[in-house]
Image: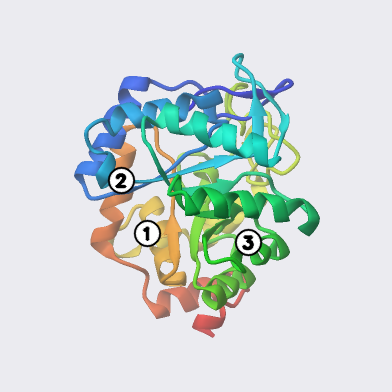
Amino acid sequence: MGGPTWCGDQPLGWGRVDDSESIRAIQRALDLGVNFFDTADVYGAGHSERILARALDGSREQAVIVTKFGNTFDEDRHQTGTNVSPEYIRRACEASLRRLNTDYIDLYLLHVWSLSKEESAPVREMLEELKNNDIIKAYGWSTDLMECAQFFAEKPGCTAVENELNVLVDAKDMLELCERFDLSSINRTPLAMGLLTGKYKSGSHLPSDDVRGKEPEWMKYFKGGEPSPKWLKKLEAVRQILTSDGRTLAQGALAWIWARSERTIPIPGFKTVKQVEENIAAIEFGPLTADQMHEIDEVLGERSPKFR
């Protein structure tokens, strides 16, 4: 919902957005029982946080707000680098509080993929300080690196890790770490950046201001602005299982995550009220069954410990 954002000529956002529709979609989610909203200061160079604040006006206490820090940006919507100094973290937190129109942040996540322990220690200390002062309620790290997540997890103020997880990309080790340290697993790419909605097929092409249209090096689901044949093949292999019992493909993908672990919190992106309603309707079906999870593991040639 931040709209186009750039790093040099590399798009980082999800294309153009309609702010009015964004606000309606958030409010519809709230009406249907969703209370967990994930954003970041760098999304739209602060625009996403401002939109969330507008949508939650008068309903702040009903929501759990997650935002992130660590990426620097300018008013022209360009990401300019990273900064994790204690002084910057405090300034970034204060700026997010203003944009979100709140006096506290429920969960504050480090948004830098990798740091050494020496670099991470002062970050963790500052987050503990912010928590002790009731400026944030808890903190965590958005990363798939085990050593980073574990370093934060050793402190009581860390309650979550935000990691990639979907039916096509499991995260066995990270889920085991979350179990060991009593953390929530907030799941990035639960719909594989849109691939698991079924909207994109071979030949589909994304616009140039979409991160999937001119993909960065880390992008795997889309190549050359089109869905990757490798991942489309994996999707087709499990489509029938995910859409069983009357689910849409997206609803089946969310059901897999709920079945994978009781600690998972998928955060599917959305741009419209219709997408919100479809995602939330997945709750009516509940998680996939153990047999369905077994079948998916067999088809993909993978094994999740819980379903061996």
> Is residue 282 or residue 146 the one in the foreground?
146
160 is higher (above) or lower (below) than 276: below
Is disc 1 surrounded by few (<14), some (14 to 19) or many (20+) residues within 10 Å? some
Precedes in sequence: disc 2 or disc 3: 2
Residue type (three-letter) at the residue carrying disc 3: Phe
Residue type (three-letter) at the residue carrying disc 2: Ala
Is disc 2 surrounded by few (<14), some (14 to 19) or many (20+) residues within 10 Å? some
In what element is the residue under mark 3? Answer: helix
Q: Which residue is mark 1?
A: 243
Which quarter of the rendering shows the C terminus?
bottom right
Q: Nearer the viewer, mark 2 or mark 3?
A: 3
Precedes in sequence: disc 3 or disc 1: 3
Residue type (three-letter) at the residue carrying disc 1: Thr
Q: Which residue is mark 2?
A: 63
Q: Which residue is mark 3?
A: 152
* Extreme-bottom residue of the structure: 308
Left or right of 218? Residue 182 is: left
Is disc 3 surrounded by few (<14), some (14 to 19) or many (20+) residues within 10 Å? many
